[in-house]
Image (tube, rainbow, N blue to C red):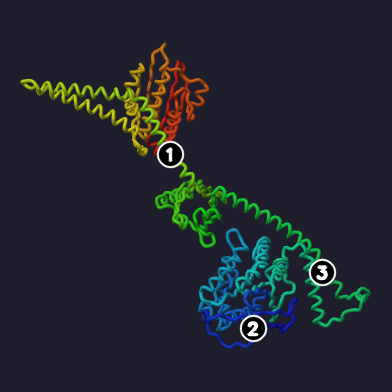
Amino acid sequence: MPQQTFHGPAKSGGGTPMRIRKRTAGAARKPPETVATASTPLRFALEALGGGGHVCSLYEARQGCPDILETFLEVGIARGEKCLCVVSAGAEKSFRATLRAASPQIDRAVKAQAVDLTTIERAYFTREGFLPQRALDFWRKSARRAIAEGFTGLCGIIQVDRALGDAAVLAHWIDYENHLTPALAKNGVTILCLYNRSVQSGEFVRDAFLAHAIVAHRGGIGKNTFHVPPEEYAAPDKADREVHRMLASLGELWRREGVPRPAAGELAQKPNRRLSPLLRSVKACKHVIRALADELREHEREERQLRRYVDYLTLGQQLNRTGTWAWDCSSGELFWSREHFRIFGLDPTRTDVSPQLFFQRIHPQDRARVEQEFHQAVHAGHDFDSEYRIGRPDGVIKHVHSCAYPVFGRPGELTEYVGTAADVTERKHGEESVGSMQAELARATRAVTLGQLMASIAHEVNQPLAALVANANAALRWLAWEEPQIGRAQQALTRIVKDGNRASEIIERIRALVRKSDARRNPLSLNSVVREVIVLLKTELRRNDVVVRTDLAEPLPPILGDQVQLQQVLLNLVMNAVEAMSSVNTRPRALAITTASDRTGVAVCVEDRGIGLDDRVLERVFEPFYSSKPQGMGIGLALSRSIVEAHGGRLWAMRNTAPGATFQFRLPLAGAATK
């Protein structure tokens, strides 16, 4: 492609000729109809300027910028590019009027939406302030969008005619300008930056001027010999390079003005009066630039340290599988960390998060509950804490535990919520596995207990069966008489039915204890549980000479529980009491079972007159696989405590003042358990 050089009609301060590659416009989208325009040196240079140019133009009054603005837009329109103008907030209306009045060609392009307009505040700023990376991403996305719409490329105009903000914002802006040149070259975007010198500080204008590789000034355009490349912006020898560029520019200026070079030693003997102040200024600038370079290096060191802290925080979130989020109550803006995006299976570069997106990702069965909990927390200004399931785009269901606390500004004014979202899927699966294994262990323990009671159970079943056979024989005899005794036979048959039902009830109790079924919690009375266990152990108690005394409170409020599991708890406690009294021969083997209640719960107490518990056994009696009995497995009491705690209660043991020990458990009422 041919190379062209343009010097400009007038000398530009610090400018030298530049070599520019001519760009051929594509034909993907037909540009707006153009009219013949007179070719000027400025237009010629802009037409020859290839994609990726970063042009700076300084002006002191509004009438000082329309020429370069109009020419730049007309060149971009003629090449089939989309023109995107970014101006200060509040200046959109006047700027749009300026565009439409500039030329018919620009007016038609505005109507055809080939020229678009937005504000610096919308494009560059967030609630955290001005972010250089957001500004760079804005131009990268805009370039891709222009190509997708059928334009050959993108040209942009940034007009800064109002103060941008404090020193921190200005520093970020200069950092953005220094990184914009390589970003534009990578994406093929040409940008014209217009700075109003009358509203900006001299230091800011100088730094902005140094960040641009190309300068347009007084109808000319050329290479900025004072330009500081991005790679030199933070270089340790930045000051020396600045001085080198100044001297090189000075030499070029002398050469172009025809200043004669003095003979050797002449400059030292007869210093030029105009040159001496300039050299003093250069030396002073050198010291200032070195001081600024030192400050910049310190700033970069702090920035690297801050980035390291951010990296550590990100790594910690990945290890803990915990993301962070923040929600602005006034604007509704939602922020997610990268780990939060990963948990939800979303791409942070392609997803705009919002409260609507968050609630859409929650499992339909949990969505209404979580929305209600969140809105209640916001309305009351309280902490938010909830567990829920989410559906990821890949179909995976995750369990998430989210908690947040409110942040207040002025007294009573809620500004935002800051919280975390932890992936607890593995923990949930582990809890489900433990629960399943615990249920299997409980069923096995019940089977072992019933195995120990098999002789007593067989005797308990044999009694109604023997009575059933005796009554059946009696009925046959009454019916075999010459005059059948129908009334007496009916009485015998009635006793048969009663004995059969009694045997069936005993067998049903045994089947219920060993049946493999899920826990079902229903309102029930603990008095009925106590009576069922006493009936089941009646023969075992009688065989061990144990006298049972019951003191059951009536009426007893219902609790919410699984009858089979609570029968197992009481069965374990009674059997342990019977075994504790098996070696006692000097006093009666008495067992007391009592129930009581208050406004919050129901208590069951099992008190024996056995050998009791010493301090060592009392501390470890509920530990898994610990038993004070030689033949014990150490499972019954540990399992009983886990069942009681799963019902929201507690189980404990204590020594009696008299001989023996007492085991007591307490469960909440049905209403309290539901809450």
Give me the disc on residue 43.
Answer: 2
Q: For mark 3, what is the residue?
A: 282
| Amino acid at circle 3 | Val
**Disc 3 or disc 1, which is closer to the eye?**
1
- Front position in the image: 354 or 583: 583
Quadrant for the C terminus, please.
top left
Q: For mark 1, what is the residue?
A: 435
Alpha carbon of mark 2 to alpha carbon of mark 1: how far? 79 Å
Alpha carbon of mark 3 to alpha carbon of mark 2: how far? 35 Å
Q: Position of residue 641 (x, y in %)?
A: 44, 31
Q: Position of residue 412 (x, y in %)?
A: 54, 49
Horizontal side of 241 relative to 211 (left or right) equals: right
Can residue 620 be seen at all in this image of the molecule? yes
As drawn, the residue found furthest toward the top would be 586
Q: Residue 166, relative to residue 104: is it above or below?
A: above
Q: Earlier in the sequence, mark 2 or mark 1?
A: 2
